[in-house]
Amino acid sequence: MEGVLSRQTRVRPLVEADLDAVVSIDAFAEGVSRRPYFERRLAAALREPAWHVQLAVDDGEAVTGYLLGRILDGEFGQPGRSLWIEAIGVRHDAKGAGLGRRMLDSLIEVARRHELTELRTQAAWRDHALLRWLDEGGFALAPNHIVDCPVEGGAYAEARDAVPAAAAANDGASEREQRYAAGASNDFERLARDGAEICAMEEGDLADVLFIDRAITGRDREAYMRRRLDEALRDSAIRVSLIARRDGAAAGFATARVDIGEFGRTAPVAVLDTIGVHPERRRGGIGHALVSQLFANLGALRVERVETMVAPRDLALLGFLYAIGFAPAQSIPFVRAL
């Protein structure tokens, strides 16, 4: 039976008191409670309201739907700012009443007030109901590439874990460690991650991360990188971001997060947000070392796979990821121009 809009139905900002209702709606739909995920997302919005848009729709008596979004500013290699839809849900007995469209219309109004030019999200290709909603809402396929790789307990994978060839190929790209050749050496006694001192990233590593980022981009992106680091360390269920040093100097970093909940995920997935290697260390295998250690750590944590999104123009990075075992994911990226 389809839900019916009441005269009291309204869309408003999500508040802390709505948490139980949101968790209940999601648990009914997914068959499992993901309360910790929603607690973290709400806490993040309360901590940095300028970067989050979280909406609730209620009928005057109870919350009947929710939408979680956040503002992106350069993530995944995308130029400019966009509004990213992380999660959306409608109570089972209120579906069919147009609540999702009401929330989307409100989200578009917020995005325009922030002078954002597009909405972005992703969905599993088997989620037919969500795909239909995105189609009806004016979304189109985005040119980004979503790729993932099974962790398989962190088991040795030659393309990823072997020491890269000394004469690494350089395709002339201006940044990132993806320039390394895919060919692996025959030195099985030494792993790629043995070639650098790799540690879990801490808040005190921000200066080193900024140093590497400035060397790569030629710009000072302190506000952006501070926010990325803060999110990696505080908004993830498990902290897995890494920093690499060689000869005592910062050489590279990778920001990643592990969570259950975003885009309807019910299994632990690590999302690789950013990977950067200092230009002077590009031929030193730092990128391989970071990825090798990341997979080893995730295997110990029983994380099932690693996912990332690559900008369409970043073919060198995409080639690097494919060479070390990544492949197209079962999710589709979408964009809606405003």
Image (spheres, helix red, strand yellow):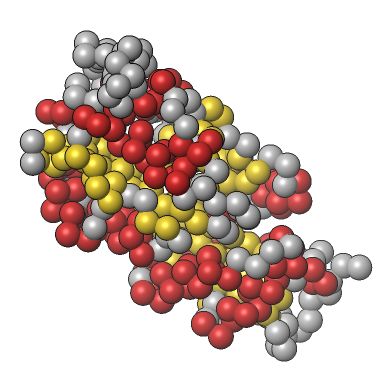
User: Quarter of the image containing the N terminus?
Assistant: bottom right
> Who is closer to the viewer here, 98 or 196?
196
Q: Residue 61: image x %, image y %?
A: 72, 88
Would residue 119 be visible to someone looking at this image? no
Q: Is residue 281 above or below residue 109?
A: above
Q: Is residue 260 above or below residue 287?
A: below
Left or right? Give the position of 4 relative to 144: right
Q: Residue at x 41, y 70 (%)?
A: 44
Judged from this view, the residue extending furthest toward the front is: 189
Would residue 162 be visible to someone looking at this image? yes
Q: Residue at x 37, y 41 (%)?
A: 294
Q: Is residue 324 above or below residue 94?
A: above
Q: Residue 314: image x %, image y %?
A: 37, 28
Q: Residue at x 35, y 33 (%)?
A: 292
Q: Residue 335: image x %, image y %?
A: 54, 44
> Who is closer to the viewer here, 51 or 266?
266
Q: Residue at x 29, y 27 (%)?
A: 192
Left or right? Give the position of 224 relative to 206: right
Q: Residue 173: image x %, image y %?
A: 26, 22
